């Protein structure tokens, strides 16, 4: 548990994103957090979990204190994990809700058991009570299968493949792809672009310049390089490509949006100029600069295709 492994299990390149989300955005995530809980458990499952919390608290079993302590520990785990996820400044924060689901699942079981016991006591017949609870569980599984299993199959989503191909189609061999910071959704898109570069015939080989948070890079040169090394040699790159124009490293960079048919937003940007001391220094020849100058933006913002 030393060196790179310790760094990885304590956050790795995402250390700076822990508990880093602004308070207003944390509040904005609350509806989304409830939505993913609802997707996992449905209304019936959340109702059983709430009943299970009450049942554990009022437990009259042979070892009530032990059962209560275990229940409180699970609730504390779920609460702390939820706080961590809601304040984690990364785009796919909801993926890290899994421990919350795991901590709440025993309460669903406890709620089902409490409901079965109550129904059995009301009917004085345990058989029908167990059958009713079993039927409710079967209904939950069927609803999940019908509504959620199709969401697991993402094979129809070709956005990254389509956009990455469009970006690389006219890229120069050896172009540098400036990978977005881990907090940006484009961070994940960059891995797809690099994969396409390596795997698809006809697309040029590129170098992924990893952000400062990913140091050392995940692989060897020339496929990957450090931002610290690339930042001092930008003028020597055959071509610079970026994916997130809002990155704070691109102040004064002239970005040419690369658009593809059917896309409302750029699939990426080519760096065609630098602004230094108020003067614009093109990185392309005069004829091309004259042709693209009107479309170049120096704003650190992602703008729609025109």
Image (cartoon, rainbow, N blue to C red):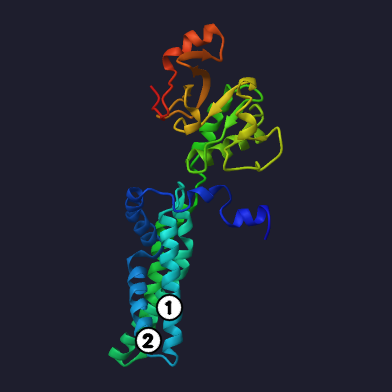
Numbered disc 1: secondary structure: helix
276 vs 77: above or below: above
Numbered disc 2: secondary structure: loop
Residue 59, label in figure? 2
Q: Is residue 148 left or right of residue 115?
A: right
Residue identifier under label 1 = 71
Q: Residue furthest left?
A: 122
User: 112 and 299: which one is in front?
Assistant: 299
Residues at circles 2 and 1 in contact by the CB criterion of under 8 Å: yes
Q: At 39% across and 68% down in the image, what residue appears?
A: 140
Q: Is residue 296 visible?
A: yes
Quadrant including the N terminus: bottom right
Quadrant including the C terminus: top left
Q: At 52% across and 43% down in the image, what residue appears?
A: 182
Among the 4 quarters of the image, the one containing residue 197? top right
User: 88 and 287: which one is in front?
Assistant: 88
Q: Is residue 150 visible?
A: no
Sequence-wise, the earlier of marks 2 and 1 is 2
């Amino acid at each position: 548990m030393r060196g790179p492994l310790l760094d990885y299990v304590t956050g790795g390149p995402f250390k700076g994103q822990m508990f880093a989300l602004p308070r207003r955005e944390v509040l904005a995530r609350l509806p989304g957090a409830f939505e993913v809980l609802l997707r996992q458990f449905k209304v019936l499952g959340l109702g059983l979990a709430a009943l299970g919390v009450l049942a554990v608290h009022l437990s009259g079993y042979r070892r009530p204190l032990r059962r209560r302590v275990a229940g409180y520990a699970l609730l504390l785990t779920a609460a702390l994990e939820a706080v961590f996820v809601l304040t984690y400044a990364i785009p796919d924060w909801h993926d890290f809700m899994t421990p919350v689901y795991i901590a709440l699942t025993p309460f669903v079981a406890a709620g089902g058991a409490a409901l079965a016991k109550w129904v059995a006591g009301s009917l004085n017949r345990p058989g029908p009570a167990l059958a009713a609870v079993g039927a409710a569980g079967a209904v939950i599984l069927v609803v999940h299968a019908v509504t959620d299993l199709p969401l697991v199959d993402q094979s129809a989503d070709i956005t990254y493949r389509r956009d990455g191909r469009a970006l690389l189609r006219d890229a120069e061999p050896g172009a540098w792809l400036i990978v977005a910071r881990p907090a940006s959704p484009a961070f994940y898109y960059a891995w797809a672009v690099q994969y396409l570069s390596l795997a698809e015939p006809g697309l040029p080989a590129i170098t992924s310049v990893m952000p400062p948070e990913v140091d050392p890079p995940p692989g060897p040169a020339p496929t990957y390089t450090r931002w610290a090394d690339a930042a001092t040699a930008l003028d020597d790159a055959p071509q610079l490509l970026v994916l997130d124009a809002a990155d704070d490293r691109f102040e004064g960079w002239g970005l040419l949006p690369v658009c593809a048919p059917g896309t409302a937003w750029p699939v990426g940007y080519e760096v065609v100029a630098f602004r230094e001391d108020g003067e614009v220094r093109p990185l392309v020849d005069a004829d091309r600069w004259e042709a693209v100058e009107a479309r170049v933006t120096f704003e650190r913002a992602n703008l729609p295709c025109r």
